[in-house]
Amino acid sequence: MAQRLGGSFAPRITDDKLEEYRQLAGNVPDQRCSEYMIQLVEMLDLFNETPESSLPGTKNPLAGMVVPLEDAEIKRIWDKVPYMEECDLIGKAFDILPPGEQRNAAYHLLWYARELTLDREPMTQERVGFK
């Protein structure tokens, strides 16, 4: 399988940021968007329970390393990570959100889902050397 490179270059979602996103998700006026955001917060809650992958990475031409998830982690989070097609549908749903905090949070969560769908550690500022 070909390795897809890239990254959001967004900051890592810390526990504090995840809690902020959980609260924002509960206040989104569109119920469908709120449910998607809550689903993605739950995905990250599960993903954050384990340490980073210890597998060797491959150099990203932009900077940093692309590090695959370990098989046990892929299996553990499998039920919470949406398929790429689902990520596309969620992204289209998020398009209705007006610019601002909720929309930014929604797309930040969605980026993590897309990265986890590719079975790799999410590419963030820290992973590619920007801080």
Image (cartoon, rainbow, N blue to C red):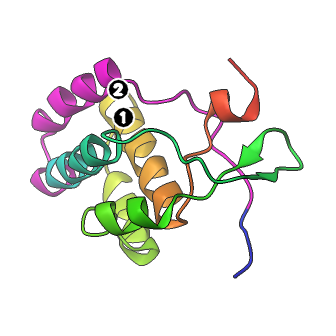
Residue extending farthest to the right is: 61
Q: Label 2, on which residue?
A: 101
Which residue is at 15% across, 57% downward?
32
Over which residues does the magenta segment extend?
5-33
- For badge 1, the amino acid type reads Ala
Which of discs 2 and 1 lies nearer the camera? The answer is 1
Hey, which quadrant is residue 45 in on the image?
A: top left
| 17 sits left or right of 3 in the view | left
- Vertical comparison of 11 with 53: above or below: above
Q: How many marks?
A: 2
Outermost residue, bottom side: 1
The one of 1 and 103 positioned closer to us in this rendering: 1
Whether the residues at callouts 2 and 1 have beta carbons within 8 Å, the answer is yes
Secondary structure at badge 2 equals helix
Q: Position of residue 82 (x, y in %)?
A: 34, 68
Question: What residue is shown at x 38% (from left), y 27% (from top)?
Answer: 100
Q: Residue 81's x, y, as percent? A: 33, 63
Which residue in the protein does label 1 denote?
105
Tell me the amino acid under the disc marked 2. Answer: Glu
For mark 1, does the 10 Å Cα neighbourhood hold few (<14), some (14 to 19), or many (20 or more) residues?
many
Identify the image quadrant of the N terminus: bottom right
For the residues labelled 2 and 1, the Cα–Cα distance comes to 6 Å
Residue 93 colored in magenta in the image = no
Query: Residue at image x 84%, y 39%?
Result: 63
Q: SS of the residue at dot 1?
A: helix
Between residues 94 and 43, which one lies in front from this camera angle? 43
On the picture, is 7 further left or further right than 20? right
Report the quarter where the C terminus lies: top right
Q: Quadrant of residue 17?
A: top left
Q: In the depicted view, which residue is nearer to us: 74 or 129?
A: 74
In x, y percent, where is residue 15? 31, 24
